[in-house]
Amino acid sequence: MKIAFLIHNAYGIGGTIRATGNLASALAARHDVELVSVYRSADAPKLPVGRRVRLTSLIDIRKDAPGSETDNELQQQPSALLPARERDVKAFTRLADLRVAQYLEATDADVVVATRPGLLVYLTRLATERTYVRIGQEHLIHGGHHPEVRAAQDAAIPLLDALTTVSEADAATHRAMLPEARTHIAALPNGVSAAAVEPSEGSAKLVVAAGRLIPVKRYGLLVDAFAKVVAERPDWRLRIYGRGPERTALRERIDELGLGENIALMGPHSPIETEWAKGSIAAVTSDFESFGMTIVEAMHCGVPVVATDCPQGPREIIEDGVDGLLVRPGDAGAIAEGLLKLIDDEELRRNMGRAARASARRYAPAQIAERFEQIVREVRPELLPEPAGKAAAPAPAPASAALRRTAARLVRPLRRKAAEALRPARPAAAPEEPAPLKPLRPRASARATADGGLAVRLPRAGVTGEQLTLTARLRGTDGTGEGERIELPLTRPATGKGPLTAVLDRAGTPLAEGRWDFFAERADDGKRARVAADLVEQARLLTLPLGLDAGGHVTAWVPYVTAAGSLTLRTWRRPAHAELDAITVGEASLTMTATVHGTAAPLTPASRLVLVSPEDSAYDVDVPLTALGPRQLRCTVPYDLLFARRGTAHDVWRLALRPAPAEPHVPLGRLTGDSVDRKRTDVHPARALGHPVRGTVAVRPVFDPENDLTLDVNDVTQATM
């Protein structure tokens, strides 16, 4: 059976794209499957598509790409067939009308599936004489569309053979709203693949949420709820992943509540599974969820979900009190109560996490593919008959025939040997040339180990050759100097199958501070290539303290994937380091607590915090501190101390510890955890103060590229408040 899925843009990121790709990939194990993207906006899909799925695009809108049709006159005109909400340049145009019509007329598919309202309308208004099965998919809920889009879709549904919704509740709603339609309406949940990551251990004091930052997700409500959590459990943290128009409002609300140390806006992250696995609890606070792919993703990672009991999906996914909790929608107190219930009961949290993993298996793409096949059987049985029973065994052959076959098997090799003896000898064949080595395209996955080291898995695909070496080079060097290059011995599996593996021990490997890039090097032909990374797991770093290497240096390692998709290891190695425990931003001062690690002298009344001048050490500012113990300190920095030393319209003062007058400065920052860029995620508010000469200035604590703390001072005309 050939199945074609019509999708708006398979090259973007979104729940519909992910769900369609998962279903198409699962069906491709048994059928001929084509994913038809109306638009192509990138060179390759951002979300994975199964290798057996054929990907076709109808309109190329890549900038400056050969064959791009961004300047096509029809691409500048709105669709003549679709309602206004669907017919803008970002959605559907006259060119889309034409190309989709041409495709629907020419396709030889047995089943065509439309995945959004505009495509559903196309499917019922174009190529109406064709006999393929027409299936529409509703990925929102009946009441989730603009009225004119809803009206267009309701008019099209009776012309379909089948309509699928992502929940049983929404299927019932569609049947009730369209009582005259003879279309087969059935629930088909989104397929969500099990995560290829280690499940959460449930030990990190972290709540995770993920999705588009839009009003319906109610992340502002989650922030308010977490303020109640922090009042009782100040050592817990919340991370919110995603991008969207609500980010600025969320940032302002976090600053208003003084929760910069407890709530981080992490931005988008793909794959998100590594981030779910870092959490001990997931939170979903939407006003409505048509399905809830994020819920199933978190459950696959062994993370119980606290979700609002909103229409439609959560209550069909979560069994309240067994594999997660359902709480009242729109109620910050109820959300906080649900979170605290799991925070305060570690055993319940872990048990629910295990139950969540088991429950999530219901949504494996292979199972959803079987449900899709059953829908096709119900509307067109001849296309996909029920699986037949085992065929009857053939009757046994007569004994004489069996004897003749046995004799033939015995005589055949004797005849072959006799014929070979009479055949003249052949000249010796020339030795064959060895097959050329394939291009070196290494792709790896990596995982932080329990002691903070690094384990790398290198699948055989893309790394042919017997003399293969995995190396890491310190960025900014040529890799030839001492300490600039290391070699990781690759272990080959005993059976000859499976990936190559390498483990880098943090305590026994004194890596210089910086960024280490990984390469596969092949001595067979001298080729070298950067190692791409599909998956890097950092979950174990969240509960791991700073370490000491064999030389007594303070160390921290964070493996990560670069923007270009390559595997890199960020390392820190220092004789001493002051790790920030907490930051409180007051109206006119900054208060910090920190713990000193490494070789620094014990703290005394003479110890000082130093504001290191951006211009000249003669302008450094010493600030008294309070020693809470030989290794712990608290210090308050009044911002006006900087005013007498202002140099330019924008000054950046680095903060450091001087344990004793003759001691060198000790960096002050945050190296624990999984972050290579604290500036992006650990954000604190600016304070506006009056400068006696420069007027209003803004002061903000900011982490620098080394994850050390600075004070950023701007004239207000240049400051971003």
Image (cartoon, helix red, strand yellow):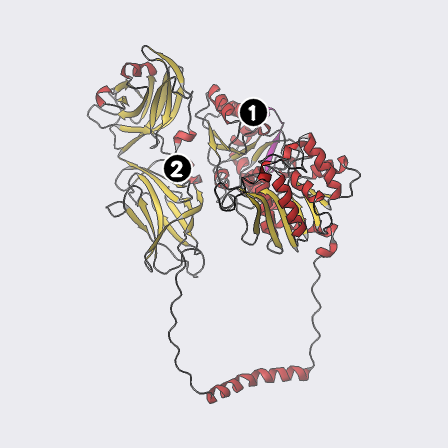
What range of the chain is rendered magenta? Answer: 321-335
Task: Report the front residue among 636 and 68.
Answer: 68
Is residue 466 left or right of 326 when viewed as pictured? left
Q: Position of residue 287 (x, y in %)?
A: 62, 29
Q: Which mark is residue 701?
A: none
Give the quarter of the figure containing the C terminus: top left
Q: Position of residue 404 (x, y in %)?
A: 63, 84
Kindly give the residue lying farthest to the left in the view shown: 662
| Residue 554 colored in magenta in the image | no
Mark 1 crowd level (few <14, some 14–19, many ≥20, 10 Å Cα): many
Q: Position of residue 545 (x, y in %)?
A: 37, 35
Q: Residue at x 49, y 86 (%)?
A: 417
Kindly give the residue lying farthest to the bottom in the view shown: 422
Residue type at mark 1 is Leu
Give the quarter of the figure containing the N terminus: bottom right
**Tag 1, which secondary structure?**
helix
Q: Which mark is residue 544?
A: 2
Residue type at mark 2 is Leu
